[in-house]
Image (cartoon, grey):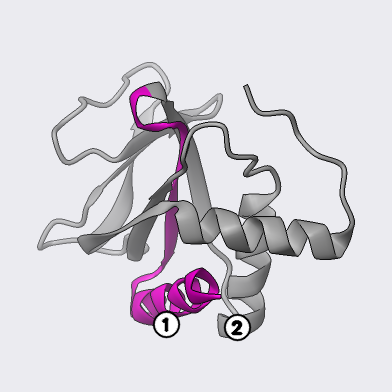
Amino acid sequence: MVSVSVETRQQTEERLRQVISMADLTVHDGVWHFEEFPADRPPELTEDTLAVVRDSESWSRLVPLPRDGGESERFGVFSFHFPADLDNSGFVGWLASHLKAELGTGVFVICGSNRARGGIYDYWGCPVELLQEAVAVVEALRAG
């Protein structure tokens, strides 16, 4: 079990730079979008479904954009799996702030857990047109 540390801003920066360098990074091929379903009709889980979330009115399923994608927002997606016993607290805010400052864009983040791969993992989405630039920012942070 990892305990969340209390640290200075500089210590946080150093720790999260180490976290990003140690995380497994995957850039997912293709263009992704959210399909929406009424709250009383959960979506089917398919092999290409990356995530499913809901609010009080609807379900959203993150899946590859079909050829006739219509008016859906289009996203590029990358993900991180973090090593076990690594304090990654603050990672989402830290990286989202870097991406906003460098690219001028916001992101979405969906988190999950897979204890067999260390625990917490994150899916990150950004406008598909900015995926290569977002990954370049991530790779620069990983390089130190």
The image quadrant of residue 135 is bottom left
Where does residue 93 sit, x and y in percent of width and height? 68, 55
Specify the principal SS of the magenta part: helix
112 lies above or below 99: above
**Pointers 2 and 1 in contact (CB under 8 A)?**
yes
Q: What amino acid type is highlighted by mark number 2?
A: Glu
Which residue is at a point 56% across and 53% down the rendered structure image?
19
- Secondary structure at numbered mark 2: helix
- Secondary structure at numbered mark 1: helix
Q: Is residue 90 magenta?
A: no
Where does residue 48 sit, x and y in percent of width and height? 16, 41
Q: Earlier in the sequence, mark 2 or mark 1?
A: 2
Identity of the residue furthest to the left in this view: 67
Distance between the alpha carbons at the discs numbered 2 and 1: 9 Å
Please indicate, yes or no, whether residue 118 appears anywhere in the rendered image: yes
Residue position for label 1: 133
Q: Is residue 97 left or right of residue 55?
A: right
Q: Which residues are magenta?
A: 116-144
10 Å neighbourhood of mark 1: few (<14), some, or many (≥20)? some
60 lies above or below 140: above
Which residue is more in the foreground, 136 or 127? 136
Which residue is more in the foreground, 3 or 127? 3
Which residue is at a point 52% across and 58% down the rendered structure image?
20
Which residue is at a point 53% across and 62% down the rendered structure image?
107
Where does residue 120 sit, x and y in percent of width and height? 49, 34
Which residue is at a point 36% across and 58% down the rendered structure image?
78
Residue position for label 2: 102
On-image quarter of the N terminus: top right
10 Å neighbourhood of mark 2: few (<14), some, or many (≥20)? few
Where does residue 82 sit, x and y in percent of width and height? 47, 43
Please indicate, yes or no, whether residue 36 appears anywhere in the rendered image: no
